[in-house]
Image (spheres, rainbow, N blue to C red):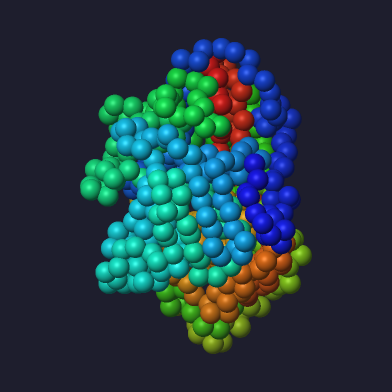
Amino acid sequence: MRYNRTSKALVLSAALALTLTACGGGGGGNEADETTGGDPAKVITANSTEPQNGLLPANTNEVGGGRVMDLLFTGLVSYDIDGKPVNELAESIETTDAMNYTIKIKSGQKFTNGEAVTAKSFVDAWNFGAAAKNAQLNSYFFESIKGYDEVSAEGATAETMEGLKVVDDTTFTVELKRAESDFPLRLGYTAFYPLPAAAFEDPKAFGEKPAGNGPYKLAEDGWKHNVQIDLVPNADYSGPRTAANGGVSFKIYSTFDAAYQDLLANNLDVLDQIPPSALQNYQDDLGDRWVNQAYAGNATMTIASYLPEFKGEAGQLRRQAISMSINRQEIIDNIFFGGKQVAKDFTSPVLDGYSDALPGNEVLTFNAEKAKELWAEAEKIDPWPADKTFTITSNIDGAGNKEYIEAMANQISNTLGIKAELNPIPTFKEMRELVVSKDLKGASRAGWQADYPSLYNFLGPLYGTGAGSNDGDYSSKEFDQKLAEGLAATSVEEGNKIFNESQEILLKDLPVIPLWYQAVQGGWSESVSDVKFGWNGVPVYNAIVGK
């Protein structure tokens, strides 16, 4: 698919079409095999976590809710298995200056409650997502639109952005604050989905039983909290992601070990994360039903800016010392059996524009002697409290979290001579609630799975001042300015160059400590075929076929 443009300077780089390759043997899971037939009525079972919030597009920014939302809804575009944008509801997205966009949508589309999907469905949803009074976690995704500042400021009474205009039922316009050449690339992300009128009448109730417009719909009483989320095919969906099965049931597990045992017993069809206990043998266990594939994701450790021990010059030295005291490769080899890659920056190597040679990235290399030296310099400025424990908060229901953080804490403790330990939280949802409340007493486990294929997506949402996923409350005027320059670039290539310059600032400040790049290590049961994993590490659920 091509965005209709009239300026050659605005054409997206062809390299943005990511090409992922399997890292291991076995099934690989990314070839475009022809469907082998089978049972189209079979309901596919897949692992998941309990969504943090109700299922509203602008309030869903974690994987448990995100994987469900992406099946219940569809937006102007979606992303194919390689990360290329593909038209869903968009007929065209046109601009002559990368600041003023005219968007035409397909007619005849409807939500599962029978309401028509119109241009107003998008404009109303985006305004709702941006307005401060609605406190949506993804509100910052609309910050580029003219009028965002007036609706998003604390105490704002305005509810509509000046830059959004409905022209007719199938046309609306978007005026940005400044030229942003990659704006259309973002429009497949969850925050930009349309909503029916019912969502605004009672958002909380709608979030429990959303009426979407995607390839699936929520089954009757489909969300059994902390147990299972059941989806069935949406017969009215006519886009490129039509269901090849009879539905998807997301089973919510407290541990990946339990999920893996269910997979081996054919009681679970798709598992997107093999637990550490099985990494050594999962390929033998599963035969050709496994994948080890790079995707656009990373793992980091957040050290919040509001922690007194990590402020100022001493805090900056401590962050660098902690980073250099972590032997990332040792953890990858011993806990993940080589299934990750040591981080060299804050993004992902599968993205266009990635560089592993950024000035200052030596701070991400294990160097015990340098770490001790930096810590000693910090001690001269502001001594570390004698009774202080450096804690790393993490949910322990995720595969390998407990193991790698305990190993990392031991490395930090042994190198720096301080007490460091895991602060275990039972579930991902509970951990996110603690992080969002800004009440951390130490560091926290973090990471990012791309929303759309862009370097900026790994930078702006996480480190921009006030951004919704800026867990550590990092703020830097210099960094914000660099981001703005990168967004205003007239080409993706030029923007990427500037975004990499912004990372040089992050390498000095270390609002988070990059650990490694992610790879999806997953598997599937004997009861399904045509299992593929996409550019973002998520199974292509709609394409899975039952046997």
The answer to whether 445 is drawn above or below residue 209 in the figure is below
Residue 281: give x, y in percent of width and height: 64, 29
**Residue 431 visible in image:** no
Residue at x 44%, y 45% (from the top left corner): 170
Looking at the image, residue 428 lies above or below residue 23? below
Rendered position, 436 above or below 509: above
Give the image quarter of residue 255. Answer: top left
Q: Quadrant of the N terminus?
A: top right
On the picture, is 374 further left or further right than 155? Answer: right
* Residue closest to the eye, 460 or 50: 460
Residue 446, can we see it?
Answer: yes
- Give percent across and percent down for residue 210: 32, 39
Residue placed at 65% from the left, 45% from the top? Answer: 2
Q: For the point 63% across and 50% down, which residue is it?
A: 4
Residue found at the very far front of the displayed protein:
168
Along the viewing direction, whichever of 381 and 249 lies nearer the viewer? 249
Q: Quadrant of residue 167?
A: bottom left
